[in-house]
Image: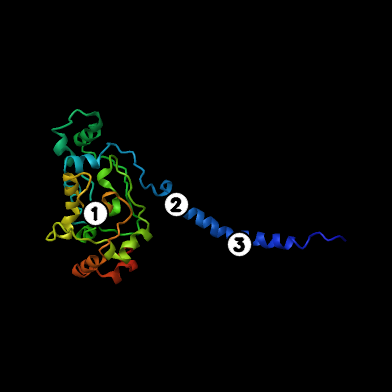
Amino acid sequence: MAQLFRPSHNNVAKLMVAIFASAPFILGLAISQLTRQSTGTKVGVPLDQPVPFSHKHHAIELGIDCRFCHTSVETSAVASVPPTQTCMTCHSQIWTNSPLLEPVRESYRTGKPIQWAQVNKVPEFVFFNHSIHIDRGVNCNMCHGAIQKMQITAKGQSLFMSWCLECHREPEKFLYKDKANPQMSLREQVFEFYKKLQRDDEGRDMMDIEQRMLHGDNLPTNKDIAMGEELVKQYKVKKEQLTDCSICHH
């Protein structure tokens, strides 16, 4: 009987085994990369909203303090979405006939809240507290991207666990002290950042780390590590606890 397979077919068989064995890993890597694209994370993708609210117009051009709308950001786990009554503080007097604001007026007349599309959301098994981060001087832009530039709000960061751990593992790289106002608390300097932008919307006079926050890049790295390490001590940031699972997962 003639030989069906040549010796070279052994190499083909080994190659096929290697391909089939590695296929699950290659598929997993491909899916992992796909989920990290903007199509999966929605980073930078504005969502349709019932009212086209512009952070740039309200926070920078008009100079409205973030806390006027996000009233609980300093004291609660959630930043809070402003009720219609807050919007009508101004819009009962200005732009009273604008078609774009009809959903706001309708909500005020009927008492039915506006159904905003949620832009940022961590999984149900994750606990995130805004007030703690604000108290440690973590600027809004670190998590929300260049929010002061957004005409329609979009997700600024992926909010992946690995991204959160960058800061939790080395907080000294991300804490900073406003050198122009050394007496200011870390909490207050979070909002001073936007006051500076209101005075100079290009941020030309800002220090290096603020420039990186200004452009909404990934978490800014503090070049002054010594200052960051001092702030870790000063504000009693317990680094060994920040990577404990129970910090975020209760």
The quadrant where residue 19 appears: bottom right
Q: Residue at x 17, y 44 (%)?
A: 198
In this view of the protein, which residue sits in the foreground, 160 or 122?
160
Residue 35 location in percent, x, y? 44, 52
**Amino acid on which disc 3 is placed:** Ala
Residue at far right of view? 1
State left or right for residue 71 relative to residue 169. left
Q: Residues within 10 Å of mark 2 (few under 14, many from 20)?
A: some
Q: Which residue is mark 3?
A: 21
The mark that comes first in sequence, 1 or 2, is 2
In this view of the protein, which residue sits in the foreground, 56 or 131?
56
**Amino acid on which disc 2 is placed:** Thr
Q: Is residue 125 above or below residue 65?
A: below
Q: Residue at x 37, y 48 (%)?
A: 43
Q: Is residue 114 above or below residue 14?
A: above
Q: Residues within 10 Å of mark 3 (few under 14, many from 20)?
A: few
Q: Residues within 10 Å of mark 1 (few under 14, many from 20)?
A: some
CA separation in Å, label 1 and label 2 = 30 Å
Q: Which residue is mark 1?
A: 210
Q: Which residue is mark 2?
A: 35
The mark that comes first in sequence, 3 or 2, is 3
Q: Are marks 1 and 3 in contact (CB under 8 Å)?
A: no
Q: Quadrant of the C terminus?
A: bottom left
Give the SS element for disc 1: helix
**Amino acid on which disc 1 is placed:** Glu
